[in-house]
């Protein structure tokens, strides 16, 4: 694996760095400074972050690795990694469009027809359509095959019934991609279909609810005989074949656990901030843990470069994505826990670290609990027998 960058890639980095520094400063000025930016999981903060997403799109940085026809730059995966490193190095905000751009979009590229790609992707990149993930249900969290929400074939479309929960930023989004049971008599992993659903349909109720940290972006989504027309999305609302939703969803989970949702740049920047915090508040007791966390962030970067090398050679993201997910989610917790120990009694007053720690705690749960991911890695990567 060649760890050097070409002249073209270094030029790409320089362009991204210059654009981010100039435009991030301008965006903060528009809102009265960084201290006035609210969490993207609040209604006010979501609206603020939306202006940033649209600025990214205008600069053609919203989805750099996509074809230019869909709003991207035709950049390589290597250049995408470079952009992600520069994005987090600059201190840019979390992407409120991430569930669309990093989860749904790769699945649309793989399973969508041309009409779907031509409609969904440009509007997603421009932050005109905002997508949330409708998978979890009250009795089906990590057990995705246990969902009971139904989609029944009717003339001209589908009738939707059921409930989705823990829908991240669902209270503010316009569309939902979800799994629905289209053949109630089929076995657990069969008879599921992957549907693209506008949330303004009659019979759809989106009810936001607050979290302990005060953010309000989570939502429950109720379907009460909602009619979803086949032409609600050009090219159709069904992504992939009817009854093949599990296979399509596994492609999305590969993105969620693997390459795109949590790039190394995020953790490299956090590790660097942690080093700076340690220099301000040195604690020999925490030195070894800090060094270990920094090394794990760098190891994640090297592992990702190796993954991109394989993908560029024609490989696909397989069950190894479960190992990936365990690594970054537990690393995120450790980075923030060290920071809170360094801050001591000031931890609750240090907003970014405290807020980051609260979010990091959810990492071992979302995208499939780490207990489930360890089972997948044991069985499908190591070949160990099921007990």
Image: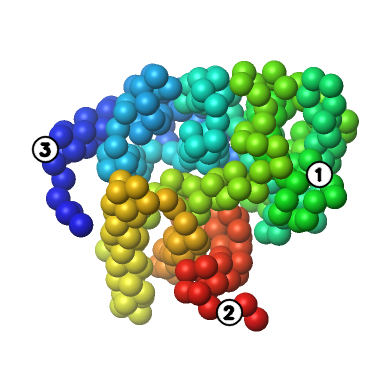
Cα distance between the residues tagged 1 and 3 = 54 Å
How far apart are labels 2 and 1 at the CA level?
31 Å
What is the image's colouring? rainbow
Residue 262 x %, y % = 44, 50
**Going from the N terminus, do you reach mark 1 or mark 3 first?**
3
Among the two numbered marks 2 and 3 on one chain, the one whose residue lies closer to the N terminus: 3
Write down the residue under mark 1. Answer: 183
Q: Is residue 359 left or right of residue 43?
A: left
**Label 2 residue SS:** loop
Residue 293 lies in what quarter of the image? bottom left
| Labels 2 and 1: the sequence-earlier one | 1
**Between tags 1 and 3, which lies in front?**
1
* Residue at numbered disc 3: 7
Which residue lies at the image location 77% right of the left edge and 38% below the top edge? 221
Q: Residue at x 77, y 33 (%)?
A: 206
In the rendered image, residue 83, in percent from the top left (x then y), is placed at 30, 39
Tell me what residue is drawn at x 30 percent, y 71 percent. 291
- Mark count: 3
Residue positioned 37% across, 51% down in the render: 315
The answer to whether residue 37 shows anywhere in this view is no
Q: CA distance from mark 2 to mark 3?
A: 48 Å
Q: Quadrant of the N terminus?
A: bottom left
In terms of secondary structure, where does tag 3 sit? helix
* Nearer-the-camera pick, 288 or 380: 380
Q: How many neighbours does mark 2 have within 10 angstroms: few (below 14), some (14-19), or many (20 or more)?
A: few
Q: Which residue is mark 2?
A: 385
Which image quadrant for residue 140?
A: bottom right
Determine the secondary structure under disc 1: loop
């Amino acid at each position: 694996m060649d760890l050097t960058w070409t002249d073209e890639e270094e030029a790409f980095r320089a362009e991204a760095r210059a654009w981010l520094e100039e435009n991030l400063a301008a965006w903060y000025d528009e809102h009265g400074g960084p201290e006035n930016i609210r969490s993207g999981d609040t209604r006010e903060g979501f609206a603020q972050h939306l202006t940033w997403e649209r600025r990214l799109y205008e600069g053609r940085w919203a989805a750099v690795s996509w074809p230019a026809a869909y709003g991207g730059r035709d950049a390589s995966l290597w250049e995408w990694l470079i952009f992600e490193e520069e994005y987090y190095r600059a201190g840019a905000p979390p992407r409120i469009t991430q569930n669309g751009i990093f989860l749904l979009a790769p699945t649309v590229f793989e399973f969508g027809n041309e009409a779907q790609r031509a409609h969904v992707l440009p509007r997603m990149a421009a932050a005109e359509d905002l997508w949330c993930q409708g998978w979890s249900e009250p009795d089906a969290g990590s057990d995705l095959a246990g969902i009971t929400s139904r989609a029944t074939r009717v003339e001209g479309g589908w009738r939707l019934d059921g409930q989705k929960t823990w829908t991240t930023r669902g209270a503010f989004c316009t569309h939902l991609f979800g799994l629905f049971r289209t053949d109630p008599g089929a076995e657990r992993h069969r008879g599921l279909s992957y549907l693209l659903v506008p949330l303004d349909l009659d019979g759809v109720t989106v009810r936001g609810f607050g979290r302990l940290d005060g953010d309000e972006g989570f939502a429950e989504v109720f379907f009460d005989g909602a009619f979803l027309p086949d032409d609600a999305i050009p090219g159709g609302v069904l992504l992939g074949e009817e009854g093949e939703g599990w296979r399509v969803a596994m492609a999305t989970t590969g993105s969620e656990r693997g390459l795109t949702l949590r790039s190394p740049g995020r953790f490299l920047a956090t590790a660097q901030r942690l080093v700076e915090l340690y220099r301000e508040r040195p604690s020999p007791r925490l030195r070894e843990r800090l060094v270990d966390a920094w090394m794990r962030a760098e190891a994640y970067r090297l592992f990702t470069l190796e993954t991109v090398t394989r993908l560029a050679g024609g490989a696909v993201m397989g069950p190894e994505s479960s190992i990936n997910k365990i690594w970054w989610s537990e690393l995120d917790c450790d980075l923030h826990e060290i920071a809170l120990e360094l801050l001591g009694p000031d931890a609750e007053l240090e907003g970014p670290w405290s807020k980051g720690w609260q979010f990091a705690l959810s990492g071992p749960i979302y995208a499939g609990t780490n207990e489930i991911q360890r089972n997948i890695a044991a069985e499908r990567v190591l070949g160990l027998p099921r007990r």
